[in-house]
Amino acid sequence: MTREEEISFGAFSLFPGRKLLLRGGEPVRIGQRALDLLVALARRPGEVLERDALIPAVWPGRHVDESNLRAQVAALRKALGESEAEARHVLTVPGRGYSFVAPLRESVPPP
């Protein structure tokens, strides 16, 4: 049996395959684009992902303005309960892009 991908950080568990984010075991209300952004960032923790790499990950095959990315970053931060000033999970790297900075927890499979 293949184990489902789970990315855990703080009180959160992200299940990319199910497009699900949990906080303390409860589903978090988050839009699809913000969730796709979280998946892209959390799969490459500590790396700075440039806007040109994030836009195709969140909007595949579409041309969108950078303001759309900023709006989704704001929506993601709101869902995670943070602001740009506190940046516990998503850090803005001025002139470059964004980085997922929350420490990952090792996921423990259910018994």
Image (cartoon, grey):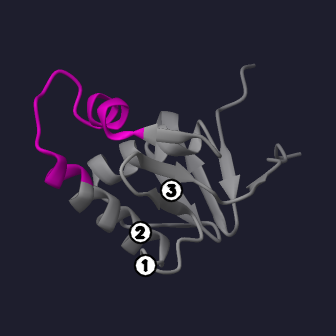
The image quadrant that residue 60 belongs to is top left
Image vertical order of residue 106 relative to residue 23, above or below: above
**Which comes before the other along the chain, label 3 or label 1?**
3
Q: Residue at x 18, y 47 (%)?
A: 66
Image vertical order of residue 12 relative to residue 50, above or below: below
The image quadrant that residue 24 belongs to is bottom right
Question: Does residue 62 belong to the magenta stretch?
Answer: yes
Q: Identify which amino acid the numbered label 1 is placed on.
A: Ser
**Residue 55 picture location, percent across and down:** 27, 36
Crowding around mark 2 (Cα neighbors within 10 Å: few <14, some 14 to 19, many 20+) is: many
Q: Identify which amino acid the numbered label 2 is placed on.
A: Arg
- Label of residue 83 in the image: 1
Please give the range of residues in magenta. 50-69
- Label of residue 21 in the image: 3
What is the CA distance from the residue labelled 3 to the residue labelled 1?
18 Å
Question: SS for tag 2?
Answer: helix
**Residue 39 picture location, percent across and down:** 48, 42
**Which comes before the other along the chain, label 2 or label 1?**
2
Locate residue 98 relative to residue 110 in the image: left or right: left
Locate residue 69 relative to residue 94 in the image: left or right: left
Q: Identify which amino acid the numbered label 3 is placed on.
A: Leu
Prevailing SS of the magenta stretch: helix
Question: SS for tag 1?
Answer: loop
Residue at which label 2 appears:
77
Nearest the viewer among 42 and 51 is 51
**Residue 47 picture location, percent across and down:** 59, 40
Crowding around mark 3 (Cα neighbors within 10 Å: few <14, some 14 to 19, many 20+) is: many
Question: SS for tag 3?
Answer: strand
Name the quarter where the N terminus is drawn.
top right
